[in-house]
Amino acid sequence: MSEQATPLLEAHNVTVRFGGLVAVDAVSANFVPGELVGIIGPNGAGKTTFFNAISGVLVPTSGRLVSNGRNLTGRGPHRFAAHGVARTFQTPRVFPDMTVTANIEFGLKFAGRRRRKYVFWGDELGVPWALRDAMSILQLIGLSAQANLPAAAITPSQQRLLEIGMALATRPKLLLLDEVAAGLTEAEIEEMARLIRRLRDELDLTVIWIEHAVTTLLRHVERVIVLHQGRKIADDTPRNVVRNPEVIEAYLGDEMAEPSTDDEEVAA
Amino acid sequence: MNSRQFLIRDLLVLLAFAGWCLALPFYASEFVVSMALTCLMYVALSSSWGLFCGSTRYLSLATSAFFGIGAYTSAILLGQFSWVETIAIGAGIAVLVAIVMGAAVLHLRGTYFAVLTFGMTELILHAVTYFEKTVTGTVGRVLTVVPERDTIYLTMLALALLAVATSIVVRRTRFGLALMGIGADEQRAQTLGVNTRLVKIAGFAITAAFAGAVGAAMAVRWTYIDPHTVFNPFIGFQTVLITLIGGVLTLWGPLLAAIIFSVLAESLRLQFPQIYLMSLGLLLILCVLYLPGGLASLRWATFKDWWNDSRAWARDIRSELSGEKEREKQRFKRREKESHFV
């Protein structure tokens, strides 16, 4: 298989500048199919801005974005969505007046739409069984009981799940999760992490995950990119990243390095 | 009711409305027919306006620009082309202008968009006035080849029905869903795969097509047009008002409000012009304050809510006036003091 050779998404020297402030400074990264990558960094490190750039929400000041050999630099977010890049937002941005099911169906009807077996009916082609319709997606994220409620009426943590569901409804290849576990309890974060791993395994997704709960993140991802003041200072396995002196100095701090190594032992 | 039953209901109501309007010229007086014509004009304008501006929440004040473009097309071309062709060309030119205008300003939101569409209307108005003065050397134009009244009435009826039918269809398609998504959260809709730029321009163009066609049809009714009557910003404002009072998101709101408006307008304007404008303003204020969904969102439960609200309000006033509220406060204070000592 040449899967490892062709990255799903390549970012070449992506730079985003807001006036005089360089939010993202020449960050390059490749994401290959099936990876679960974490992005960490202190507040204001440019994590979300980098996400906005690689999901098309923001046009980078310079740099190139290539998906499956196709140049997507400067295209609208809907083009990224059509190429299988789906994202969630830091604060849930569901459609509050629509029901939970309708929120999921929105994605299915636009970026998630696929050719059917026959012209107007039959199964949609090339769609994972778990993403076949709104009900199955709701089952996957565990919101079946809330299917008919308006999205404004469900709890914030359920709205985070719905955000993921809406992203899944676009039948993505690459899922960008922006702090989906923010504000959750320790147990809920763990559950969310397990859900993300399950999605990755069952749907063959590539997942890029930004999170502040670094210990949980490091336990679950296979690769970590560390951003600091807009620059990429590390891109390695969690085991190596927590030992990286530059990362420790910039972000983790001396006391943070200890619990992370503990976690590694637990995981091992 | 499920969505299929809703569709059947809407189509039946539309059919009944069409039948009633068709029968009207046979028994009603000249005055009533002319009132119905204005009414149908506003049904077409506000239904098509609500179709785009209601769901996307883009407040466009450019209706009068498209209306005027249609009217001028009709004034210039009616000699050479047939009636239907003239209206189609009027709509077409309005669509072209809307595409250019939309590409220029549709990335702006809220007040900026409203103000810019208004500014563009003024720009077109003054450009046409200047052109007429310097090139053709006249102020207005007299339409000589005019179709008879029934033709105009039927055309306007067809346009109104088409506007409502388009609204029904758009609501049930992906296009309508995309418009809704843009209204709720444009960026989110984009990341879910909606080409928002294209959808917005298409929606704006549909609105413009109806306004242009209505303008082309209405121009012959007036027989004499000049830039200040057909590019009158009041046409745009009134469309917005009617749609807001009727309910921007509802299908039947604009139609309902357009009927109320034309009846109000025709019955009050001649005798008490100030009262007409005042009642417009009052109706708008009441709708915005107490009925944000518009007249078409009135339900039995709404009346019940109002009744309960006003009773609660009256109870409050009573307790205030009888001094009960003051005593309650005193009691509360005393209890707090006691609990401190304990």
Image (tube, coloured by chain):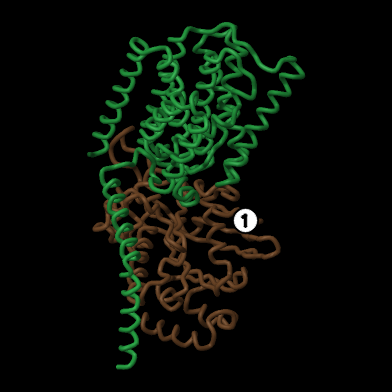
Q: Residue at x 66, y 29 (%)?
A: B124
Q: Give, as a three-letter code, the residue at label 1.
A: Pro
Q: x%, y% of residue A134? A: 30, 50
Observer-nearest of A189 and B307? B307
Q: Please say whether residue A67 is visible from this viewpoint.
A: yes
- Front residue of A143 and A50: A143
| Looking at the image, residue A209 lies above or below residue B167 | below
**Compared with residue A140, is residue A77 higher up or lower down, i.e. above or below?**
above
Q: Residue at x 58, y 44 (%)?
A: B107
Q: Quadrant of the N terminus of chain B?
A: top left
The hue of chain A in the figure is: brown
Kindly identify which residue carries mark 1: A60
**Residue A195 picture location, percent across and down:** 33, 66
Report the residue that reaches farthest toward the right. Answer: B134
Q: Residue at x 47, y 36 (%)?
A: B280
Rendered-image quadrant of the C terminus of chain B: bottom left
- Front residue of A43/A170: it is A43
Q: Is residue B91 above or below residue A4?
A: above
| Residue A154 placement, left or right of A233 | left
Whether residue B314 sits left or right of residue B230 in the image: it is left
Q: Which chain, by letter, is green? A: B
Left or right, A186 with reference to A74: left
Q: Percent from the top left, x then y, of residue A67? A: 52, 52
